[in-house]
Amino acid sequence: MKIIDPATEKVIKEVDEDNATTTEVKFKKLRAAQSAWQDVALAERIQLIKKFSDLLEKNVEELAATLTSEVGKPLQQSRNEINGARSRIEWLTTNAEKYLRDETMVQENGMEERISYEPLGVICNISAWNYPYLVGVNVFVPALLAGNAVMYKPSELATLTGIEIDGLLKRAGIPTGVFQLAIGGRGTGELLLELPFDGYFFTGSYKTGRYIYERVAAKMVPCQCELGGKDPLYVADDVADIKSVAAGTADGAFYNNGQSCCAVERIYVHEKVYDQYVDEFVKEVKSWKTGSPTEQGTYIGPLSRKEQLTVLEEQLKDATRQGAEILTGGNKVEGYGYYFEPTVLVNVDHRMAVMKDESFGPVIGIMKVKDDKDAIRLMQDTDYGLTASVYSSDRGRAESILKQINAGTGYWNCCDRVSAALPWSGRKHSGFGVTLSHAGIRAFVKPKGYHLRSGAQ
Ligand code: NAD
């Protein structure tokens, strides 16, 4: 498999993909090693994961350079991602004991009723490329802490990062048999679906997630799908500082080139503040530096996937044909690299694909609304349900709107953020299951109920 730098289109490395034989051998290694890993004291497992985090810190520059070379995100955003992964690990290691230890629920008249949390066994993690550290850590860290063995399939677009993650986990002392890498794309993923894993944890598109869910259904094992979104954001008429709201929300739409599952994908603005907001938003977008991801100060680098350039062009063609206006951007950049200009569209509506389908790129539609009711109706008009955001100076108003939106996360005066303490979970085509928070630790265990009667029988 050729690894291509999206900024230059040059092949930076060639790696061997796994095949049916190697994936099976790896699976058997995981199966053989898992029960001994389960018996390692949780405190020791926590220490090993902390060492992994220390290694991430020590090697951040080198790791960030690799990440940027294969996915094209600006170097500073690669560093941010690795540091963000470390803070998630911090939360998970601090809280693992609390949520994994046995719980005595009832103790009376010689009867003890207890829950113990057993690992699922050998789990399969098929992952995405847009935040390989963050979405990887969400799964393999709690899985390992809970005593599972993990087959980790990084996206084919983040293979080198996957190899580095594997190397650092082993250097931290995670036994070889407990964590294995499956290298390759769709074909390798298909091979993993054939093997008898005890759980599947997928991050990626709705299309692939739905396919995997159907394929593994007959196994009757847990399957979690963290999928895409078309996340709405509403700017109400009572925001105090439109300039800063415009700058913050533009970052929410364009950070990582819009290639975030929780990127703001469509914006609704109250008619009273619409003109000023759009003006400030466009100014902000025009102020960014687009260019090589390794250059200091670059905010917009290349997209990670060449195919997405066509998706964005098609969305813009469809929108302008139906009356949308492009205020800035609108084209792919000529020359080498998968560059697309950051693009702002107005006069958009819900007949257009750009307001309905995930763009996953530096394109945003902004739509004027009459009132909160109008905003809620439009925010709800989607197949997805990952996050939703409201900007307003009135918390009650914002919370009341967020309650009416069927999404896994609600934001007031912020957007495009993830906290390790809170559940990360989609609704509808954004998937199901939970990572992060106490629920995201418990996702990797099976609760077992014990009824223990003491005394002479
Ligand atoms: P993708 O669905 O193309 O691929 C995801 C993974 O599935 C890759 O590892 C790929 O090799 C593998 N795969 C592809 N076809 C397969 C098959 N038939 N069988 C088994 N495995 C297969 O998604 P992507 O392009 O890597 O990621 C982008 C998508 O992920 C976006 O929709 C984004 O919103 C979503 N995402 C969601 C979250 C979340 O937490 N909800 C986080 C990150 C990304």
Image: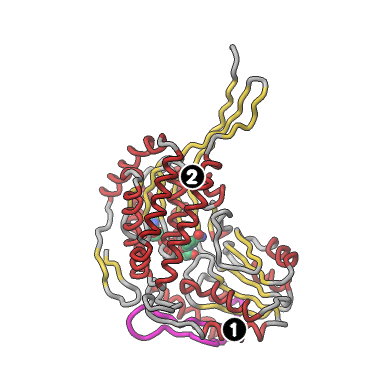
Name, please, the residue furthest toward the top. 456
Q: Dot 2 lies on which element?
A: loop
> Where residue 133 sits: x, y (%)?
42, 59
Q: State which quadrant residue 144 falls in.
A: top left
State the mark number for residue 444: 2
Residue 457 x/y as whole percent: 59, 12
User: Residue sitting at 28 percent across and 54 percent down?
Assistant: 18
Say how the picture is coloured. Answer: secondary structure
Tell whether position 48 is magenta.
no
Looking at the rendered structure, the secondary structure element under dot 1 is: strand
Q: Main secondary structure of the magenta part?
A: loop
Q: Residue at x 37, y 61 (%)?
A: 155
Residue 387: image x %, image y %?
Answer: 59, 63
Quadrant for ligand 1? bottom left
Q: Residue at x 25, y 61 (%)?
A: 15
Height in image: 315 above or below 108?
below
Instruction: Name the disc covering residue 346, or none.
Output: 1
Question: Can the viewer see residue 205 in this picture?
Answer: no
For residue 327, above or below residue 36: below
Residue 342 lies in the magenta stretch = yes
Q: Residue at x 60, y 31 (%)?
A: 104
Taking 374 as reference, is 322 left or right? Answer: left
Residue 176, position in %: x, y? Answer: 31, 45
Part of the protein shown in magenta: 323-351
Label 1 amino acid?
Answer: Val
Residues 164 and 408: in front is: 164
Q: CA distance from mark 1 to mark 2?
A: 44 Å
Q: How many residues crowd around disc 2 within 10 Å: few (fewer than 14), some, or many (20 or more)?
A: many
